[in-house]
Amino acid sequence: MGRIKVNGEWLVEEQEVKEGIVNSFQQLLTEDMVWQADIGNIQVGCISQQDAESLEVPFAEIEIHSALMEMNGDKAPGPDGFTVAFWQNAWDFTKEEIMEMFKEFHEHKPLLGASTILFWC
């Protein structure tokens, strides 16, 4: 490497280049001293390996359906104007799309599509 520009300054010498790169990344990756929440003496326990693994299991249809049915039917989830009662009554013909949304969520993909609007707007 011949030279590199770090913070507006050209560095030519090998040692300067190394130090310049290290310093630049240290500045980028160093956490600024900003306010952080103080949790005091709260003891946060660890969960078991089995519990941790259960958090990564895809949502079951019965879980999603039960959660939907437990919601207050008079509430509108977003600007679409459809009440939760609509989605509760439309479950039979919307469940495939809803299940697909949760599958995509589980696979770490962005939540997109009409289903997103239903529950997240």
Image: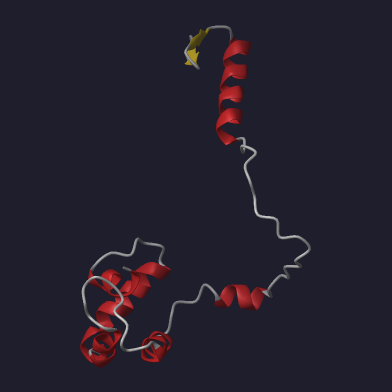
Give the answer, above or below, for where 75 lies relative to 31.
below
Task: Examine the rendering and report whether any part of residue 114 can be seen.
Answer: yes
Residue drawn at the location 32% of the way across and 89% of the way down = 73
Q: In the rendering, at what x and y percent does residue 51 appear?
A: 62, 77
Image quarter in which the C terminus is found: bottom left
Give the answer, above or below, for where 105 lies relative to 57.
above
Residue drawn at the location 37% of the way across and 86% of the way down = 68
Give the answer, above or below, for where 63 lies relative to 79.
below
Residue drawn at the location 49% of the way across and 76% of the way down = 57
Left or right: residue 32 versus residue 42 is left
Task: Examine the rendering and report whether any part of residue 1 can be seen.
Answer: no
- The image quarter containing residue 60 is bottom left
116 vs 22, nearest the viewer: 116
Give the answer, above or below, for where 9 lies relative to 64.
above
Residue drawn at the location 34% of the way across and 70% of the way down = 120
- The image quarter containing residue 114 is bottom left
- The image quarter containing residue 94 is bottom left
How many dots with numbers?
A: 0
**Direction right: furthest residue:** 41
Left or right: residue 114 versus residue 61 is left
Q: In the rendering, at what x and y percent does residue 36 appear?
A: 64, 50
Q: In the rendering, at what x and y percent does residue 111 appear?
A: 33, 65
